[in-house]
Structures are given as structure tokens and as C-alpha cells.
Image (cartoon, grey):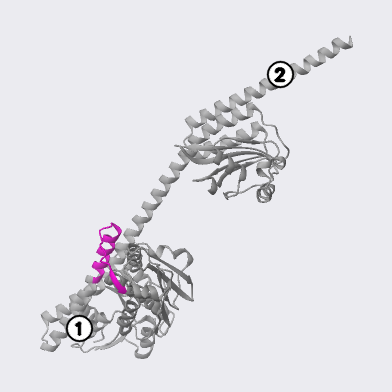
């Protein structure tokens, strides 16, 4: 079981993720934008963060940069979920310290496998 | 003896003058030949124009030479200027050039010995304009291309009056002939350059669009794919099944709306979209659009200030609804929560005017026009989270134009934007409504 924070501005995708992971034992927390995400990360200290890039108020990259600037949060892995499969955009994710990338649309098996990959036993 | 001496001196002076005159004439002939030669061998029309005007000015000994182009004599714009050393410049751009203007209107070269004594140019306004330009003597010739006025060449003395000779006139005339070719080529060259720039812009916009669309389409597809996958592979109750089917349906609609928008715009831009006009209550359309948006934007107060005199317009009901929905949804998307949105209507003569004002992030000056172009959405860190295909405003403009109206925006970055739509009320306005407005 592990704690996971999801940052995603699209309500349908938030619902999808929540539903897909409810059968698992993970402790899942949802944020609508990067600002909310950062506050949630500070509060629950997750094992892994999954984040959209294009979000209001603070985007995924800004949120990642803010985490990297905080010694207590810098170690938490981030997986970016993007709708773009263009090489440059994926590279940009890794430049902002991503530990992984998940392309939209993703299958539920992919999503669960990625969450499991970063889970503590 | 003195007599002979006098004759001798006179003779010398005479022959010296003749030699000087012959030299001047030869120099002029060489000039014309050189200009014609250059026109045949140089490809760059700007270079031909510059070199030709410079040489002519030097041979004539004027202090300034100005080439101005324009569709008519009323819209002259200086495109090239040569000045003698120390001479003040007129500068490039639109200028009031009274002598060139008159020459263009008369269709022939005008010679002015001393402008201060010329009654054609002594009304106070013209005299002031010419004094500002420092003109004393001037020769101005119109250049026509393909039967229409295209440009004007003016040779100016700011230092002294000048009696223009028949030789001067011939020289100016033959150089103007050569310039015509250069100006026509420069115009064609400029048109070509603009066409290429426009194509480049469109091509860039198209690839931007592909990436925007591929991004926007994948978001609803994620929901459709994910929920259907769960329905397929998991044990779900009938209620859960129903719920997820509903979610899939919503995302499918979203996808369909995006595709419809793209196709509609295509239809409108290629003139294949028909509008079905009827008498439509504009205030009712605005009210409905605001009402249907409220549930999706609970944190954006929308207030309506509707002038009952606006009444009915002759319009396509669905299309007009789409215009209002797009403008309102933009106002919400680009405003912070709590930012008030005000929609007002008013009647101006026989035109209905709708104004949508938001207190959002505003639009940079350079984008006020391009946002109405296809794929012309403002992309920045502040806007990239905002969903949409970037076709909302191009669709608004197309619909409004199909109705014979106009749409534009005023904006201050950081303060908000004001979108204006005007619609002619058209022929189907009820008589009693029309009377009430008189």
C-alpha cells in the first residue's frame, strides 16, 4: 500500500483514476491544479505523484520545480501524464525531473502498473 | 584691337559655354543609357529605384528627390528619398505632398520655378505644408502602371528657385519611364513576398493546430477508453455500468462537439454554410446563453444589462446562440474565479450592439486581431492549461459576418477584455417594435 497524489484538471479523468484505483489498497488523493497539488503533497507526503502538465494556476512543470526546490519534497518521484506523445514534450517532462511518463489515453492496466511500480511493499 | 580682343573673349566664352553644354548633354545621355542598362541587368527592383533616383538627382543638381507610391494621389506614401548632404529629410511613410498630388491628378509633369510665387499652391494650408517641406522649386511627375496611377517622382530645390529647361523635362521624362518598370517589379516582388509570408504563417498555424487538436482529442478519449475498459473487465453493478456508460457518453459528446466545430468553421470559411434567418429576440438569446452557462461556471457572476428596445433581429437562431455561448465561455475561461462578466445589449440606429465584458487576464495588443483567425489562440504559460481547440472566436467572426455584422475586441492586459458584436436588425423586424424605437 502506498500514498499517491494525482493532479489533473479534467474532472472526468480524475473520476476515472479514482474509480480504477479504488479496488487497490492505495491511498489516493486528488488535486485539480498544481497549487492544490503542492499543498496536498506537503500534507500527505506521498510515495509518488502523478501529474498532468497543462493545468490552471500552477502547471505540472512549475509544481515539479517547486518540489525540487524543497529538500523535504525533492525526493518524491513524479510521473507526468500528457496527451502529447511528441518527443520534445516527453523530453521536457524528464528535464523537469520526471521519473516516468504516461501517455493519454492510457489503459487501466498501464495506470495500475505504474502506480505499483512506485509503491512500497 | 580692343574690338578684336572683345570679340575673341566673347568667342571664347561662347565656345566654353557650348563645350559645357555639350558636356552636360553628354552626361545626361550617359545617365539615361546607364539607367536603362541597369534596369536590364539588375534583378533587385529596389536597387534600380535607388540608384536611378540618386543619379538623376545628382545630374540635375537638386537638393532632394522623393519617390512616393499610392493607389491614388490622396494616399501618397514616401518609399524612397535622396537628399543632398546637410539637407533635412522628409522621411519615409505617408506624407502630404501637394505638388505630387496635383501632378497625379492632372496626369502630367508639373514644373514650379518658385513655389512661394505660384498661385496654384498659395492657399494657407498648402503653403504651410510646402514650407514645412522646405520646397522652393520642384518638378513632379506621375508614374502610371497599367493605366492606373502608381507613384510619383519629385525633384526638389530647397536652396533656390529654378527655371526648368526643356532638357530637364526630357531627362525627367525618360527616367520616369525607367522607374515605371522598377516600381512595377517592386510591387510584384512585394506581393510575392507577402504571399510567401502568408503561406508560411498558415503552414505554421496548421502544424500548431494539429498538435492542439491531438492534445484536445486525447483528453475525452482517455475517459472513453478508460471507462469502457472497466465496464468490459470488471465486475460492476448495473448502476455502476449505467453511470460509466453516461460518462462515456459525455466524453463522446465532447469529442463530437470539437469535430463539429472544426467542420463548421471549414464550411463557413469556404462559403458552404447556410444560415436560416428568422425573427429572433436578441435579448432572449443572450439570457438563454447566460442561463445555460451558469451551472458550468458557478463561481463567475454574470450580470445582464439588456435594452428592451433592441427587440428582434433577422438571424439564424442556433448560430446566434453559438456566438453568445462561445463569447461567454471565453469570458469564463480567461477570468479568475469571482471575476464579474457583464453582458449588455443596446440599439444604435438600426444596428443591435452586444457587449461582453470580462475582468480576466486580457489580450496583448498584438493579438487583438489574430485571435479571430483560425488557430490564432494566444499561447502562453498563463493560457496553456485552458482547454479548447482555438476555434471559438474564428467561428464567432464567421457567423457574425454571415449576418452582415462585425465583431471586435478591446482589451487591457491584466484588467480584462470587452468583446463587441454588431448585427444589422434586418428586414423582418416587427413594425410595432420599429415604431417604438422612433
Q: Position of residue B338 (x, y in %)?
A: 42, 85
Q: Which residue is painted at 50% across and 35% down in the image?
A: B180
Same subunit, tags 2 and 1: no
Residue A106 visible within the image = no
Residue in the foreground of this view, choosing between B224 and B393: B393
Compared with residue A73, is residue B129 higher up or lower down, i.e. above or below?
above
Q: Which residues are magenta?
A: B257-280
SS label for mark 2: helix
Residue that mark 2 sits on: B18
Across and down, in percent, residue B216 comes to: 28, 70
For the residue pair B36 and B44, the one nearer the viewer reads as B36
The answer, for residue B428, to whether it is visible in the render is: yes
Disc 1: which residue: A20
On whether residue B279 falls in the magenta region, the answer is yes
Please tell me how crowded label 1 is: few (under 14), some (14-19), or many (20+) other residues with Cα within 10 Å.
many
- Residue A28, image x, y percentages: 27, 87
Label 2, label 1: how many angstroms apart (C-alpha)? 105 Å
Q: Is residue B166 left or right of residue B413?
A: right
Relative to A54, A12 lies left or right: left
Q: Is residue B189 left or right of residue B31?
A: left
- Across and down, in percent, residue A6 comes to 30, 83
The residue positioned farthest toward the right in the image shown: B2
Magenta stretch: includes residue A112: no
Provide the chain ID for the residue under circle 1: A
**Numbered tag placed on residue B82 in the rendering:** none
Within 10 Å of disc 2 (Cα), the crowding (few <14, some 14-19, many 20+) is: few
Amino acid at each position: 500500500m502506498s500514498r499517491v497524489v494525482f493532479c489533473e484538471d479534467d474532472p472526468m479523468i480524475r473520476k476515472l483514476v479514482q474509480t480504477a484505483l479504488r479496488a487497490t489498497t492505495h491511498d489516493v488523493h486528488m488535486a485539480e491544479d498544481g497549487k492544490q497539488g503542492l499543498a496536498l503533497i506537503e500534507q500527505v507526503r506521498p510515495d509518488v505523484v502523478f501529474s498532468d502538465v497543462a493545468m490552471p494556476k500552477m502547471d505540472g512543470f512549475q509544481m515539479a520545480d517547486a518540489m525540487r526546490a524543497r529538500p523535504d519534497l525533492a525526493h518524491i518521484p513524479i510521473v507526468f501524464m500528457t496527451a502529447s506523445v511528441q518527443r520534445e514534450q516527453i523530453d521536457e517532462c524528464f528535464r523537469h525531473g520526471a521519473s516516468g511518463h504516461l501517455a493519454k489515453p492510457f489503459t487501466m492496466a498501464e495506470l495500475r502498473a505504474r502506480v505499483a511500480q512506485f509503491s512500497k511493499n | 584691337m580692343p574690338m578684336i580682343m572683345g570679340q575673341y573673349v566673347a568667342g571664347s566664352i561662347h565656345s566654353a559655354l557650348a563645350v559645357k553644354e555639350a558636356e552636360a548633354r553628354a552626361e545626361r545621355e550617359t545617365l539615361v543609357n546607364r539607367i536603362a542598362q541597369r534596369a536590364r541587368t539588375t534583378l533587385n527592383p529596389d536597387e534600380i529605384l535607388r540608384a536611378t533616383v540618386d543619379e538623376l538627382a545628382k545630374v540635375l543638381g537638386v537638393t532632394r528627390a522623393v519617390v512616393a507610391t499610392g493607389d491614388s494621389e490622396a494616399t501618397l506614401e514616401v518609399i524612397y528619398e535622396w537628399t543632398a548632404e546637410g539637407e533635412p529629410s522628409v522621411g519615409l511613410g505617408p506624407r502630404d505632398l501637394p505638388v505630387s498630388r496635383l501632378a497625379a491628378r492632372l496626369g502630367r509633369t508639373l514644373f514650379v520655378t518658385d513655389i512661394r510665387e505660384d498661385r496654384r499652391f498659395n492657399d494657407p494650408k498648402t503653403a504651410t505644408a510646402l514650407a514645412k517641406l522646405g520646397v522652393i522649386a520642384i518638378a513632379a511627375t506621375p508614374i502610371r502602371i497599367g493605366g492606373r496611377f502608381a507613384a510619383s517622382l519629385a525633384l526638389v530645390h530647397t536652396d533656390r528657385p529654378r527655371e526648368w529647361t526643356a532638357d530637364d523635362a526630357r531627362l525627367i521624362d525618360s527616367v520616369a519611364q525607367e522607374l515605371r518598370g522598377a516600381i512595377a517589379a517592386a510591387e510584384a516582388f512585394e506581393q510575392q513576398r507577402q504571399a510567401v509570408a502568408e503561406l508560411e504563417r498558415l503552414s505554421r498555424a496548421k502544424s500548431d493546430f494539429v498538435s492542439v487538436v491531438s492534445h484536445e482529442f486525447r483528453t475525452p478519449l482517455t475517459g472513453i477508453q478508460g471507462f469502457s475498459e472497466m465496464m468490459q473487465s470488471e465486475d460492476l453493478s448495473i448502476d455502476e455500468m449505467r453511470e460509466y456508460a453516461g460518462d462515456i457518453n459525455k466524453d463522446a459528446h465532447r469529442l463530437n462537439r470539437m469535430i463539429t466545430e472544426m467542420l463548421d468553421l471549414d464550411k463557413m470559411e469556404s462559403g458552404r454554410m447556410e444560415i436560416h434567418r428568422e425573427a429572433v429576440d436578441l435579448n432572449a438569446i443572450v439570457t438563454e446563453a447566460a442561463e445555460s452557462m451558469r451551472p458550468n461556471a458557478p463561481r463567475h457572476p454574470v450580470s445582464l444589462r439588456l435594452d428592451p428596445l433592441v427587440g428582434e433581429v433577422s438571424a439564424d437562431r442556433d448560430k446566434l446562440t453559438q456566438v453568445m455561448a462561445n463569447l461567454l465561455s471565453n469570458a469564463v475561461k480567461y477570468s479568475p474565479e469571482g471575476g464579474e462578466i457583464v453582458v449588455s445589449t443596446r440599439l444604435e440606429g438600426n444596428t443591435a450592439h452586444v457587449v461582453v465584458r470580462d475582468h480576466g487576464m486580457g489580450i496583448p495588443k498584438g493579438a487583438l486581431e489574430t485571435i479571430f483567425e483560425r488557430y490564432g489562440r494566444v499561447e502562453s504559460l498563463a493560457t496553456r492549461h485552458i482547454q479548447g481547440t482555438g476555434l471559438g472566436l474564428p467561428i464567432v467572426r464567421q457567423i457574425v459576418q454571415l449576418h452582415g455584422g462585425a465583431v471586435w475586441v478591446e482589451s487591457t492586459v491584466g484588467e480584462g477584455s470587452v468583446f463587441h458584436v454588431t448585427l444589422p436588425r434586418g428586414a423582418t423586424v416587427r413594425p410595432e417594435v420599429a415604431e417604438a424605437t422612433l
